[in-house]
């Protein structure tokens, strides 16, 4: 038993250490799936609670698990994003960034190449039944993440060339079984986040001599929140669940640099900062055994993406960058089914519609080309022994084409201390920065392959 628990601790440590980046596979910057069993039903199984990953979907579901249970998940994400430009332009900004000064100049460049790449994402969960009423557990999973990186010649490089966000949650939880009908769950959420942003700055040292500088900023932080769950068991075949995850405020702090086109350092900031409030969510889900072979399930989740209405990156004395998002709250709904083929094999399938928080074409971020999406998922559970089983899942994510027609946000230095200057950089960002538009169309899709090992001690 001691060796088994050492293996569990090692697996959870590996999951925590592999803090990976990925293109967001759910709306906004949510990762989208933290369990292969859930993925097989397009995340409709919040009230199923058959393995330790219920810590993420509904901690009250731990009351259904006997003994000690461990679940290790590994996802392979295969994203695809293709950008086609149309009418991207730039010009000098005036005191009011709502207009261009002089004729707009079409930006030379390309589509930025392949901005997203495949990646592996791990998650791990452990539960232990203390007695007939209390169960404790811990989950380590990736809740949010995005990585989009265009080449140096991307036509939208003055707005954004690279965005990368990595996060990992450590979620200790407990559940309390009041009686055969009512169970409750509570968890604490310790979340680590690391973020990077990079864009080009148009710099004109002399008339007719125009080159690109690179502004790069990165930082990290810890944030804290909680999650709640409730599960109602109507009878042996029907149950309903309610789950809530709180928002978490992240005050990212770090460093910023400004380098010229030769890579020489022109300015630094060791007090760069940006605050992000992750979205809270509320889920309602249900599960019903139609007969001894077929079960159906469903989930509706509301997510408060409107917390992220803008991002302000303070990297003085270099610049202050404003990224307006105007995100709205969203809903996603999924339905799924599980069919027991025999004593060893259970088949799964599901469909999900997931709203995007992005509103008009003018609100879309070039480095986060989000839009409404539909999930089509299939999966299977293979019972190897009385204590071990494997889950497999495959999802294809259809993402609606996203048009982009965005004006460059204000990138001024209103708080610049009087009399300060940057050596060899007379066109200080904010006094000589560019202002313009970036326009085009994104065609995106994604595939996720998930595998999961479940072990009962």
Image: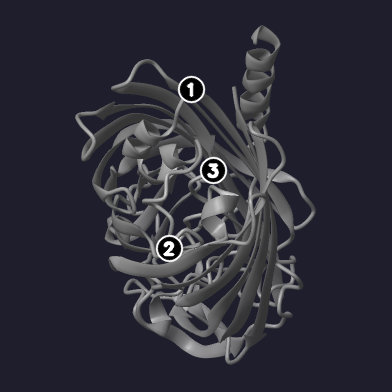
Q: Is residue 183 above or below residue 397?
A: above
**In-image side of 231 versus 375 (left or right):** left
Label 1, on which residue? 67
The residue under the point 60% across, 42% down is: 267
- Label whose residue precedes the other's in the sequence (3 or 2): 3
How far is the residue under mark 1 from the one under mark 3?
Answer: 26 Å
Front residue (pair 72, 374): 72
- Label whose residue precedes the other's in the sequence (1 or 3): 1
Q: Name the front one of labels 2 and 1.
A: 2
Density class for disc 3 (Cα within 10 Å; few <14, some 14-19, many ≥20) is: many
| Residue 142: % across, % down | 54, 43
Disc 1 is placed on an element classified as loop
Label 3, on which residue? 142
Front residue (pair 195, 67): 67
| Residue 456: % across, % down | 59, 28
The residue under the point 56% across, 42% down is: 218
| Residue 251: % across, % down | 38, 37
What colour scheme was applied to this rendering of the protein? Answer: one colour
- Label whose residue precedes the other's in the sequence (2 or 1): 1
Disc 3 is placed on an element classified as loop
**In-image side of 227 versus 165 (left or right):** left
Question: What quarter of the picture does the C terminus occupy?
Answer: top right
Front residue (pair 37, 88): 37
- Whether residues under marks 3 and 2 lie with C-beta atoms below 8 angstroms apart, the answer is no
Q: Is residue 286 above or below residue 424?
A: below
| Residue 306: % across, % down | 28, 61
Disc 2 is placed on an element classified as loop
- Whether residues under marks 2 and 1 lie with C-beta atoms below 8 angstroms apart, the answer is no
How far is the residue under mark 2 from the one under mark 1?
Answer: 27 Å
Density class for disc 1 (Cα within 10 Å; few <14, some 14-19, many ≥20) is: few
Label 2, on which residue? 291
């Amino acid at each position: 038993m001691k060796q088994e628990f050492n293996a569990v601790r090692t697996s959870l440590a590996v999951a925590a250490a592999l803090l990976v980046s990925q293109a967001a596979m759910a709306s906004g910057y949510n990762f989208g799936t933290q369990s292969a069993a859930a993925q097989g039903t397009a995340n409709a199984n919040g009230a199923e609670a058959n393995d330790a990953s219920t810590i993420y979907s509904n901690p009250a579901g731990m009351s259904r698990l006997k003994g000690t249970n461990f679940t290790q998940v590994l996802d392979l994400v295969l994203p695809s994003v293709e950008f086609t430009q149309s009418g991207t332009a730039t010009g000098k900004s005036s005191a009011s960034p709502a207009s261009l000064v002089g004729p707009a100049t079409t930006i030379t460049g390309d589509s930025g190449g392949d901005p997203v790449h495949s990646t592996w994402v791990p998650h791990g969960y452990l539960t232990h039944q203390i007695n007939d009423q209390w169960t404790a557990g811990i989950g380590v999973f990736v809740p949010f993440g995005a990585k989009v990186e265009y080449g140096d010649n991307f036509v939208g490089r003055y707005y954004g060339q690279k965005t990368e966000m990595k996060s990992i949650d450590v979620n200790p939880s407990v559940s309390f079984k009041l009686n055969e009908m009512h169970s409750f769950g509570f968890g604490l959420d310790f979340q680590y986040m690391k973020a990077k942003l990079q864009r080009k700055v148009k710099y004109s040292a002399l008339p007719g001599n125009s080159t690109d500088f690179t502004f790069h900023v990165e930082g990290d932080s810890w944030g804290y929140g909680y999650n709640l769950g409730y599960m109602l068991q109507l009878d042996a075949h029907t149950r309903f669940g309610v789950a809530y995850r709180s928002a978490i405020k992240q005050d990212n702090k770090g460093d910023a640099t400004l380098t010229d086109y030769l890579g020489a350092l022109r300015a630094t900031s060791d007090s760069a900062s940006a605050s992000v409030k992750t979205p809270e969510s509320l889920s309602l889900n249900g599960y019903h055994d139609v007969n001894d072979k077929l079960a159906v399930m469903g989930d509706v989740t509301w997510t408060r993406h409107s917390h992220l209405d803008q991002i302000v990156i303070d990297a003085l004395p270099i610049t202050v960058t404003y990224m307006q998002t105007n995100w709205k709250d969203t809903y996603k709904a999924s339905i799924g089914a599980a069919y027991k083929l025999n004593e060893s094999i259970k088949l799964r399938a599901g469909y999900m519609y997931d709203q995007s928080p992005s509103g008009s074409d003018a609100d879309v971020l070039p480095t986060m080309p989000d839009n409404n999406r539909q999930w089509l998922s299939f999966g299977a559970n293979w019972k190897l022994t009385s204590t071990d089983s494997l889950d497999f899942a495959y999802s294809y994510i259809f993402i609606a084409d996203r048009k982009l027609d965005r004006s460059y946000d204000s990138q001024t230095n209103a708080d610049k201390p009087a009399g300060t200057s940057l050596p060899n950089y007379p066109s200080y960002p904010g006094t000589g920065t560019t202002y313009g538009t970036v326009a085009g169309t994104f065609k995106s899709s994604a595939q996720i392959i998930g595998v999961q090992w479940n072990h009962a001690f």
